[in-house]
Amino acid sequence: MYDPKSMKADEFISHEEIVATLEFADAHKKDADLIDSILQKARERKGLSHREASVLLACEIEEKNKEIFELAKQIKDDFYGNRIVIFAPLYLSNYCVNGCLYCPYHIKNKTIPRKKLTQDEVRKEVIALQDMGHKRLAIESGEDPVNNPLEYILECIKTIYSIKHKNGAIRRVNVNIAATTVENYRRLKEAGIGTYILFQETYHREAYEYLHPTGPKHNYAYHTEAHDRAMQGGIDDVGLGVLFGLDKYRYEFAGLLMHAEHLEAVFGTGPHTISVPRIKPADDIDPNDFDNSLSDEMFEKITACIRVAVPYTGMIISTRESEETRKKLLQLGVTQISGGSRTSVGGYSEKERPHDTEQFDVSDQRTLDEVIKWLIELGFLPSFCTACYREGRTGDRFMALCKSKQIQNYCHPNALLTLQEYLIDYATEKTREKGDEMIKRELEKVSTPAAREKCAQWLEEIKKGKRDFRF
């Protein structure tokens, strides 16, 4: 029985409801009147149900598909403007006790070198990331209670926040680690993490259990209910995601939106972010082993439909995707991207990109500076802002500001301030020139005269050597 308020995974992610949803979508994929009414509802910027969004995803009327794409861009601009938040993943350890069939860290892989960063190595990685200009990290680790216990993760977070190298500082650490207990989530919250991110991989229970044959991750319900425990532990910003290509994409899409509806129904706060990774090649993993691979065109439509259905959420695309794909998705709803990423343990402190411990192939291998310059040239405002997290604008407080579109009053000037820091401290000359021009243009768009004046004043202070101003 489907019940978005239930705390049981099989009830808030109901297989029967997903099957019925897909049947309904198939029956109405050419129903112009229904699709028009769904689009009209979407234009109110209050979101869509999983069933309504699934009809849009299945839609086979070309002119309506164009409307979906145009609306996704409009909604993204309404809620987030032209800002794109920048982050980098930091891999702490690839020791893992799970048997996941799609991940090279699985316990049976004997060809991949196992590595776990010492605290001194964490420092080296963080300094290398700070020297690139990063302010926001997403830490990643395999699941291994002996090699990567929570105490190790907490120690790494403490180390990361402690490092102040030149003008560098990591101001927000998001965490992507295995499902755990309410008490452990409470400890992560006390350590000052930003968002807790956990990908479901697949919402199809039978497929999930097949793909996770051994290890703690085999427990579908425990994994699927993890975000609830995180919220109960006081972490009010959580991130969802599936690994597109493992199972049927329409099933995953419906499950993902049902999960967002569940969080909204139970906690009054939907997902802070939704990630849209696709399965990619890696050590001993061939994506061709999975027969559910996703075309670029459908991947773009999924992104657009998520944006239309969950207008308030941040959307993340990683360096798994190529420059060209990322360019298209930026137009359709993506608000956060990684830059200069390395998916190997200890990869940033090495001059040459190491491949032997990579979790997946990095398609976009440009430097962070190249990504920043590219974004500016495309008309996007790169943001290293972490102010909401540090000012307590998280959870329902952030969502209230976002849903009322007032968040831009903070995020837009904060993006300018953090971009100014980046340009002075880290940018190449060409990037600095383009960035300075963008700041001049964007300063005129700051919402109120008082905020514009304060922002201009702080921009000058940054040029004089001061750092970390925020609205």
Image: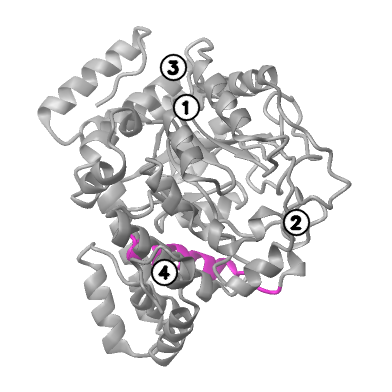
What is the spatial separation of the Cα atoms under label 2 and label 3, in whole angstroms? 46 Å
Q: Residue at the spot x=66%, y=67% of the render?
A: 209
Query: Residue 99: which disc?
Result: 2
Amino acid type indicated by mark 1: Lys
Q: Nearer the viewer, residue 357 or 74?
A: 357
Nearest to N terminus: mark 2 or mark 1: 2
* Mark 1, other Cα within 10 Å: few <14 / some 14–19 / many ≥20: many
- Residue at numbered disc 4: 12
User: Mark 1 or 4, which is nearer the eye?
Assistant: 4
For label 1, the SS is loop
Amino acid type indicated by mark 2: Gly
Residue 263 horizontal/vertical position (percent): 36, 58
What is the spatial separation of the Cα atoms under label 1 and label 4, in whole angstroms? 36 Å
What is the spatial separation of the Cα atoms under label 2 and label 1, in whole angstroms? 33 Å
What is the spatial separation of the Cα atoms under label 4 and label 2, in whole angstroms? 26 Å
Amino acid type indicated by mark 4: Phe
Nearest to N terminus: mark 3 or mark 4: 4
What is the spatial separation of the Cα atoms under label 3 and label 1, in whole angstroms? 14 Å
- Residue at numbered disc 1: 135
Q: Residue at the spot x=38%, y=61% of the render?
A: 260
Position of residue 355 relative to residue 427, above or below, is below
Q: Nearer the viewer, residue 112 or 465?
A: 112
Residue 141 horizontal/vertical position (percent): 64, 40
Amino acid type indicated by mark 3: Ile
Dots 4, 2 in contact, CB < 8 A: no
Position of residue 39 relative to residue 426, above or below, is below
428 sits left or right of 54 in the view: right
Query: Residue 424: which disc?
Result: 3
Which residues are the magenta region? 291-311
Residue 261 horizontal/vertical position (percent): 35, 64
